[in-house]
Amino acid sequence: MLSYWERQSFLHYDHIIIGSGITGLSVAIELKQAYPEARVLVLERGLLPTGASTRNAGFACMGSASELLDDLKTQSEEAVISLFSKRKKGLELLRKRLGDEALGYRNDGGFELIAEEDLAVMERLDYLNDLLRPVIELEAYQEDHKRIETFGFAKDKVAALIYSPFEGSIDTGKAIRSLIDLAISKGIEIKTGAEVRQFEENENHVLVALQSPLRNDSIVLYTGTLTVCTNAFTKQLLPNEDIVPGRGQIIITKPIPGLKLKGIFHYDEGYYYFREIDGRVLIGGARNLDFAGERTQTFSTTKLIQEDLESKLREMILPGQHFEIDMRWSGIMAFGKSKSPIIKSFSNRVFGAFRFGGMGIALSSLAAAEIVALIGDRNVGSS
């Protein structure tokens, strides 16, 4: 049962966004910039963003060479170039919006470790660089074998090294915190612990039903537009969408004296990824060891993948060095039959931006701009 005051002041909005991760916050900020007088609300079912935004590795990248070559087996050259370009533009927009200091952005470059059985990748670097020339004028991928020894990798595990000078990393916590601060400074409301059960559209509004955590009833909000930014959890609201969850398990070591690593690193078509942060090594991935088991929305870790990540540290990345594991966690990403994200209108008032394939950092800002353009095309910028 609502009070008169609650009904008058807390139920009506011009725009509601479901999901307070990097995409949801970016959409809210873009909307507020486009429509300064609009009331914009972000709803988050958890106390913190639920999914991958605050649980990822913080890679500011466009994709490794072997990953792109694998994509080309099932996608056209035009599709691969287009997605690479969107990732690049999205990262540029994110850096412009927040600034490198607020992002904790570091441009130490990206590297890909190549095993002996995968050396055929090296023979196709010129092809890849020519393909991406319209997007990046300089060589996107360069041989850099000398740094195998510099970084201290096991020479029997790493036969070649590819360098990409355009890639970097962010501090994920600082980035999301900065987006939240920016959103609040613009007058955007953010409500956590607000789980959306369902929505219904009529001629004038979208009705958004929330379960009240303290009252034995639901609360219905009214909005001019609704944008769903729930990534791997989108099927709960839009069950017909092509979305498959993909868990990413991560471990981080305690600080390692004399650590040689600097930059971000990919291995095995991007299924493994690691980086240095605060003198530690963060490593994640390996879902290709158990695709079926990792198609889950459960935040947990498994012995199979955790042991494999530790073995990669011990045998390939930090051979002969002592290290201790400090933390373990997981995040949930969204994948589908296509690597392209879903950014579309479902009606005149309902929109969505999700399925980023583990590239939400790179794609979210551009996706937000595209959503606001769709809303403008439907002439529903404010109610």
Image (cartoon, rainbow, N blue to C red):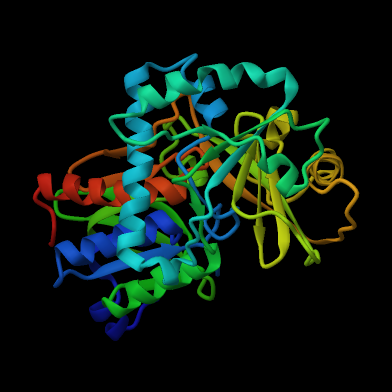
Seen in the picture, residue 61 relative to 124 is either above or below; the reply is: below
User: Is residue 382 shown left or right of residue 283?
Assistant: left
Res. 47 in view = yes
Q: Is residue 307 above or below residue 171?
A: above
Residue depicted at x 24% and y 45% = 370
Q: Residue at x 90, y 57 (%)?
A: 322
- Residue drawn at (8%, 50%) of the image: 379
Residue 53 x/y as whole percent: 52, 56
194 or 47: nearer the viewer: 47
User: Would residue 19 be seen by someone viewing this image from the given angle?
Assistant: no
Which quadrant: the C terminus?
bottom left
| Quarter occupied by residue 191 | bottom left
- Looking at the picture, tell me which residue is in the foreground, 291 or 60: 60
Which part of the image, by quadrant, shows the N terminus? bottom left
Q: Nearer the viewer, residue 69 or 2?
A: 69
The answer to which of 324 and 258 lies nearer the viewer is 258
Residue 173 image point, x, y percent: 54, 67
In the picture, measured across the screen, residue 346 lies left or right of residue 34, that is right
Q: Where is residue 275? Give x, y as percent.
A: 65, 52
Q: Is residue 80 above or below residue 293?
A: above
Q: Seen from this angle, which residue lies furthest front?
A: 146
Instruction: Using the rendered view, name the quadrant where residue 28 is placed.
Output: bottom left
The number of numbered badges drawn on the structure is 0
What residue is at 67 percent from the left and 43 percent from the top? 147
Q: Position of residue 327 (x, y in %)?
A: 77, 62
Please, which residue is most extreme toward the bottom here?
Answer: 5
